[in-house]
Image (cartoon, rainbow, N blue to C red):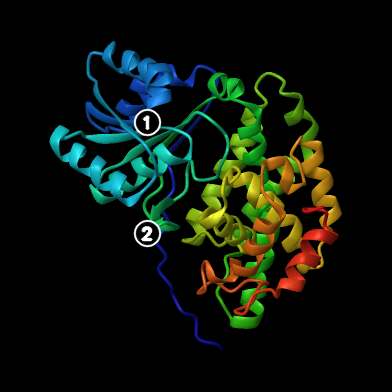
Amino acid sequence: MANITNEFKFIELPTLLCLGADMLNSLPEIIDRLSLGSKALLITDDFLRLRIGKEVEDILSDSENHSVYTSTIQDSTLDEVDKQLRIHEETQPDFVIGLGGGKPIDIAKSVAFKSNQRFISIPTIASHDGVASSRASIIGSNKRHSIQALPPIAVVADTKILDKSPYKFTAAGCGDIIAKKTAIKDWLLSHRLKNEPISEYSIALSDMTVQLITKNADLIKSQAEGYSRIVVKALISSSLAMCVAGSSRPGSGSEHMFSHALDSFAEKPALHGEQCALGTIMMAYLHDLDWENIKSVMSNLGLSTRAKDFGLKDEEIIQALEIAHTIRPQRFTILGKDGLTHEAAVNIASVTGVIS
């Protein structure tokens, strides 16, 4: 009989997933239920502080047992993390709250991790799958990195707020989910060619998110009341898949490397999910998947399949394809270690219609 190895794997997941209308009003109850303490550091941006941030302040201030200090960020950089850590040390909070899109939540996630505290994630747009993941996307030395953190102890997603957010952000979130199609293929390819370990459960969970968005594309595009609930459920499930895997592997592959490459030099990068969706079309072509079906799903969601509609230039798409393999060289994908030639990059972008 073959020897059986008992392997210990530490998986940390959010304790509470709170999704629904007017969920923000339940914040004091959520804090007390989790025994987080009384004093919060709320990290957000200038735009949201005057709107939803003020609402959070009022909700916590009206509660007898809670107080909050609000701090705003400018970007998701290492310098900003250091700045917020200094504020954290000065204010001595019991826990951290991240309110906003990707940047405030990533900074809050990093600050809480470095301070050995828990944090609550309150997304105001459904544009990315980092709302409940254990990874933080931080810019360092002019390059964006995915760094280790801890997942939030609670995600508080208020569909009344999310329904009112600009639809382009929700469509971008759907694009980030569609990207799992090729991310999974890249991981399986690395498993076959490099013997990289995989997690079948996290792969199944990640694949389910793609199916959820695909099946409900028409409903999502209609923006019917509560439509954001579907997208947030998919984004949270994608975050959980990464928590289970212990890495971003089930959610990030060659299509994300393409997007990060664009971020590094493009004159005006598009939204993360928009770029990842374009990358998914082209990487699906390389994987010999049904890339035309992926374009069809994107169109059903109201998500363009052409780079120029996002303000991206043809030459930027080509350059990003050529250097994408250098973004995370330790991560094996369909791009291999040598990447694409110029001719191949032009061909893949032209054939799939990403460039004219």
Secondary structure at badge 2 equals loop
Question: Is residue 287 rendered to the left or right of residue 120?
Answer: right
Dividing the picture into quarters, in which one does residue 299 lie?
top right
In terms of secondary structure, where does tag 1 sit?
strand
Return the residue found at the far bottom: 1
Q: Is residue 126 above or below residue 140?
A: above
Quarter where residue 251 is shown = bottom right
In x, y percent, where is residue 18? 49, 30
Tell me: 109 left or right of 238.
left
Left or right position of 283 against 353: left
Q: Are marks 2 and 1 in contact (CB under 8 Å)?
A: no
- Foreground of the two, 189 or 36: 189
Q: Residue at x 74, y 39 (%)?
A: 303
- From what the image shows, is residue 74 above or below residue 263? above
Residue 231 higher or lower than 202, as above or below: above
Residue 46 in view (yes/no): yes
Residue 53 appears in which quarter of the rendering? top left
Q: Which amino acid does label 2 sit on?
A: Ser
Which residue is drawn at the image coordinates 85% and 51% (left, top)? 293
Q: Residues within 10 Å of mark 1 (few under 14, many from 20)?
A: many
Circle nearer the N terminus (2, 1): 1
Marker disc for residue 141: 2
**Which residue is disc 1 drawn over?**
44
